Amino acid sequence: MNRFRIAYLLIVIFPLLGAFLGSMLSGAEYNGIGISFNAIALAAALLTGVLALLQHYLNSFWQVPVAIFMAIIYSALSMLSIDAPISIFALILPNTVYALLSLLIVRFIFYNRSIFRLRTLIMGILGGIMFSLYLAAIFTLLRVELGSGFWNASFVYGLIIYVFIAFSMSIADLVILQLEVKELQQQNSEDDQ
């Protein structure tokens, strides 16, 4: 059973790989302001994976505290790469909102059985919107002017990242489900003997 529980980590690892691949394929380049898009994408994937693990596989009530804790940790780590006179407390608010919205997306979109076939697309669209608003908030805090193509570029990047995250979470779910079925078959065969 412990070996099977370790397989639950796939729901965290696969989104990280998906976000990395999506980020590479999108061709987004670091613009030298604050945190790179790649770092935000990987942090979003880690957050989404951890929240999916807590919500769906462990049925834990720690989802909200963990989301807030991860937002605070990410804010502290972000301070290391931002060359601007900004307080960590200014970063905590947008990061916490982002983390809590991610929790809602995981809970009510990704694991909603009534929209199972559309969950990747819906998660991608909502992720793109959330990513754009998050970047706009961070740029505003850093007093960076939003360029003319900002909204389009940030939405498309967020859409790509979240589609890859959702797709990789779906693959992780399938692998875990197969392992679950094998475990049940083994238990049944042991019971029959």
Image: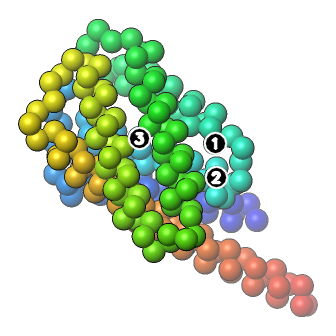
Residue 77 shows in this picture: no
- Residue at 89% x, 90% y is 192
User: Looking at the figure, which quarter contains the N terminus?
Assistant: bottom right
Q: Residue at x 16, y 39 (%)?
A: 150
**Dot label at residue 160:** none
State the image coordinates of residue 147 (x, y, percent, origin top left). 11, 33
User: Disc 1 vs disc 2: Cβ atoms closer than 8 Å?
Assistant: yes
Of marks 2 and 3, which one's residue comes earlier in the chain? Answer: 3
Q: Position of residue 55 (x, y in %)?
A: 64, 52
What is the spatial separation of the Cα atoms under label 2 and label 3, in whole angstroms? 18 Å
x, y percent for residue 15: 43, 56
Query: What residue does disc 3 label?
Result: 43
x, y percentage for residue 32? 16, 28
Near mark 1 (Cα within 10 A), the count class, few <14, some 14-19 or many ≥20, is: some
- Name which quarter of the figure residue 95 lies in: top left
**Three-letter code, disc 2:** Gln
* 65 w.r.t. 80: above or below: below
Residue at 44 percent of width and 37 percent of height: 98
Tally of numbered discs: 3
| Kind of element beneath mark 3 | helix
Residue located at (64% from left, 33% from top): 65
Q: Which mark is residue 63?
A: 1
